[in-house]
Amino acid sequence: MLSRMMQDVQPHQPRQKIMMFHAFRHAGHCPLSLSTTDNASPTFLVKDTRAKVTMNIPPLVTAADIATLGPLRLVYVPTGNEQPEGMIRVPINDWIERAKETQSGFDDLVFWQREIDALGVGSHAVSVVLDDGRMTEAARVWFILQYFGLPVVVLNGGLAALDRTPHQAPGRTEPLTLKPGSGMVGLKNRVGLKAELQKIQVFDARSAAEFRGEDLKGNARGGHLPGAAHLSHDALLDGTHLRPAAEIAGMLDAAGLDGSRPIVSHCNGGGRAALAALAAVLAGRDDVHVYYLSFADWAADESCSIV
């Protein structure tokens, strides 16, 4: 089971027998029905309260699933100046640049507290994150929010998949305390990854040309981390949608990412790595981390080996 769950989650079955909880809201409550399916995507309901969402929910949802989430807020990650009506807009460029200035990407808690406060998201409602369909930027924001302990999902297919704007919860009014590292997917920095390189499976989600060192993406050095397994992020996608969990699981197995050791995904700057981590979780991998600063950070340190 997922190793970084909230304390209330009690794993009852091995990875191939995932307990699925389906919540149905009624008069402010969430009565539960329980079913067990093999090879299902991770879906966990922890407990119900009226004031706060305290659940580990499936990290990826369809538009049809939105009605089952309870209180929610739509969070849009732009690629330009677009502003879909009725959605919170993430200042993603500011987030990307600030992350580059710290050792792990998320060490400046004052900055992240201010930014997340400005969005108005919190534990009172599930944040449904979407982008223009490329999926990488939605996954990036999903990773960040879940890292700080917030309930968040990604809408598969992005904006085009949303056929209507659902009713949304109001913005958060109570104080929010960020809890770094409390999400289902963990974070690795360069120092930690370098020390643990022989004990993990490195998931390189960059292009084949980047992996071979032919496309430097502005880095001084090219190639890949020793022992890294390569599976390009675009192979995980069918157009604007992540492929089914069983299909992704087969691709990970073929690439040597069987989950027998912790998986650490990376790309060049965080977005594709986040999507790779999301895919790994969907495929049932239960010890997944993101090296958010990724290959650009690794290549800049001459003491870090590249092959």
Image: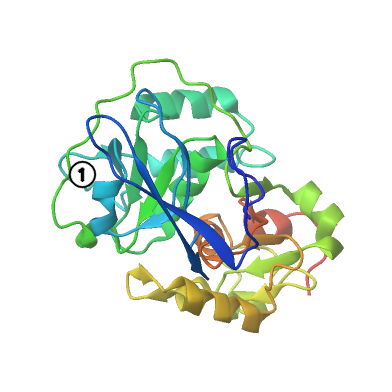
Task: Report x, y in % for residue 114.
Answer: 46, 23
Q: Quadrant of the C terminus?
A: bottom right
Give the vertical position of 165 relative to 30 (above or below).
below
Q: Give whichever of 28, 281 is nearer the camera.
A: 28
Res. 95 in view: yes
Task: Report x, y in % for residue 179.
Answer: 59, 29
Res. 231 in view: no
Q: How many marks?
A: 1
Give the vertical position of 253 relative to 90 (above or below).
below
Please give left or right for residue 290 compared with residue 156 in the image: right
Which image quadrant for residue 200?
bottom right
Task: Report x, y in % for residue 245.
Answer: 47, 71
- At x 47% / y 39%, what residue is drawn? 55
- The residue wearing badge 1 is 83
Element under disc 1: loop
Give the vertical position of 64 relative to 237 (above or below).
above
Q: Residue furthest top?
A: 174
Q: Quadrant of the N terminus?
A: bottom right
Q: Give whichever of 264, 137 is nearer the camera.
A: 264
Q: Residue furthest bottom?
A: 254
Please give left or right for residue 201 compared with residue 11 in the image: right
Which image quadrant for residue 197?
bottom right
* Kind of residue sitting beneath label 1: Gln
Mark 1 Cα shell of 10 Å, populated few (<14), some (14-19), many (≥20): few
- At x 56% / y 59%, what residue is drawn? 277
Q: Give whichever of 1, 128 is nearer the camera.
A: 1
Q: Which of the colour schemes (rainbow, by chain, secondary structure, one colour) is used?
A: rainbow
- At x 74% / y 67%, what residue is drawn? 201
Task: Report x, y in % for residue 175.
Answer: 44, 15
